[in-house]
Amino acid sequence: MGSWTYFLVAATLLAQAPSALVQKDSAVEARLRRDVTFLAVPELKGRGNGYPELQAAARHIEGELKALGLKTQIQRFPFIARVLRERQGATLIQGDSPRPLVWGKDIEALGLSGDADFRSKALAFVGYGIQIPGGYDDLAGIELKGRVAVIARSVPDLEVFAHLPRGERSLLARLKRLETAKVAGVIVLEEGGVRPLQREEGPVKMDIPVVGMTAEGFGGACGDLAARLKTIKDTGSPASQDFVQAPWTALTLDLKLRREEDWVPNVVAVIPGRDPKLRKEFIALGAHLDHLGLGERHSMGGAEARGQVHPGADDNASGTALVVELARELKRARPKRSILLLHFGGEEEGLLGSQYWVQHPTHPLESVKFMLNFDMVGRLDPTAPRLLMGGLGAPKSAVEAAQKFVPKGFAVSADVGAAVGGSDHMSFSQAKIPTFFFFTGLHGDYHRPTDTADRINYRGMALLAAFGRAVSLDLANAATVPAWDAETAKIPMKGDGGPMRIAFGTLPDYADNPKGFRINGVSKGSTAETIGLQAGDILIQFGDKSVKSIYDFMGALGAYKPGDKAVIQWLRGDQVMQAEATLRGRE
């Protein structure tokens, strides 16, 4: 977006600002409303990574900080925004019968694919490409070198895979294993049609070609793959060793991809500390600036949401605006230590901006003594205002000490470790910097086109600003800052299959609730929606397990496998409701 368009958007927003709303707001609320509305306006197209509109949003934030008299900079880092085919050709050969494949319909490259130029490479069906030492093995007894491996994308929820570490379930881990086995390439079996060519998470490029096809796209040339996969699900045993059809089928592939690189912004500013000795130390305040653009990746709105603007008002125009407001207030307060203000790009693509800053810090990393991260802070419940505050890498005593700054009528549900949220604070905790994470909870508009500025609780954000200001000043003016705590920095990663085997479909409210586990909504088409659960319901019983918290709920899920039935009880107001659910596995 050029500068002319940027100023046009700004002028349009100011003209559209409802004066009646601004008049009844406090000054803080009015500023927060203005900044969130600007960032979530449709003209900024969801601030997607690789979009010129994200650059415009970064310039807007930089301008706000410069207007405060702060020294600013925009740090940019490389990002693969688009993957395009420069050359393509694919022919499936069964015996003497070649059949050209149609790109985008029968076959499509994955964004991480390497290039290819080979003829008549034999195919080998290898199930899910999983190897469990001493147990299930899709690759046993199969010659893979120089062949094209055919694997299913999604690992089913089977007892045989229950103790498989999550990392081993990932498609990337299985592709890496096949790459090590020196396959000529991999065909990933997709369900519901091939996926569009786009950037993938993980490596920018693998050394082998990776393409997607559907079982139907093979047209019988590789046997009945759907039936073969059903056999694995029914028996829990590999169905590849005795599969002689695939070697009779071959693939000719000509593929060259071009990756177009863009530069994603981090906005950096500093409030200098007033103390000559402490001003070289920093308390960092961070929020991510990016969102999902037009919903090409990570949208929760389904296929119909793709191509629609995902405004990201709560996620995370709210945190971005709050950090700008804290900059205004902390500059006036003149703390002893310096305040480092960081607005990150690339968070939605895997914490890219915060990781890049930690690896390429604009200020000495060892001088950053604490980091406060604000992500999704715009949906404070007006009837029972409660902030969720995580302390990843922060000692428990520091989390407890922050409680004394809680405003009247406002509650904080605090926890150490990774109990809530995966956001940019994780990059700092991994660098042995203690962190606080501020979060008002998930809701039904999360990662959907309906996350709009009119749904934000600006009065709640003003309360949060007061709390954030007090905590920031306490850290910035303290004689010593709490040290990083290795124990609370641990991120639990269950590898036993556990709760992850069941997809129930609730959007959790992480706040403590004396009655049980309150939900903020349900996913479309989920088991939770099927049995009639709604936003605001409070789960109290799951099968034979009493539910008093999210931890009880997750523990209860872990006792079941797909296909099991469980009687669920919940409160809706004062009424106890009940339904039997047939539990489904994760895709």
Image (cartoon, helix red, strand yellow):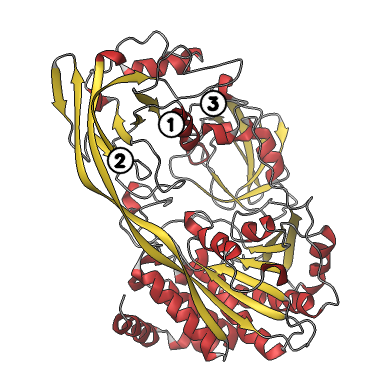
Where 437 sits versus 245, above or below?
A: below
Q: Is residue 76 left or right of residue 90?
A: right
Where 484 sits versus 409, above or below?
A: above
Q: Nearer the viewer, residue 360 or 553?
A: 360
Where 409 sits versus 426, above or below?
A: below
Residue 196, x across and y down, in percent: 29, 45
SS for dot 3 = loop
Q: Amino acid at mark 2?
A: Asp
> Dot 3 corresponds to which residue?
562
Of callouts 3 and 1, the N-terminal one: 1
> Dot 1 corresponds to which residue?
179
Of callouts 2 and 1, the N-terminal one: 2
Q: Amino acid at mark 1?
A: Glu
Q: Amino acid at mark 3?
A: Pro
SS for dot 2 = loop
Q: Is residue 555 left or right of residue 98?
A: right
> Dot 2 corresponds to which residue?
115
Residue 459, x across and y down, in percent: 60, 77
Where 509 sits versus 61, above or below?
A: above
Tell me the crowding category of disc 1: few under 14, some 14 to 19, or many 20 or more residues within 10 angstroms, Cα based.
many
Q: Is residue 1 left or right of residue 413?
A: left
Tell me the crowding category of disc 3: few under 14, some 14 to 19, or many 20 or more residues within 10 angstroms, Cα based.
some
Q: Residue at x 73, y 62 (%)?
A: 434
Q: Quadrant of residue 262?
A: bottom left
Q: Residue at x 27, y 18 (%)?
A: 222
Badge number at residue 376: none
Of callouts 2 and 3, the N-terminal one: 2
Q: CA distance from mark 2 to mark 1?
A: 13 Å
2 and 3 marks in contact (CB < 8 Å): no
**How many callouts does the rendering have?**
3
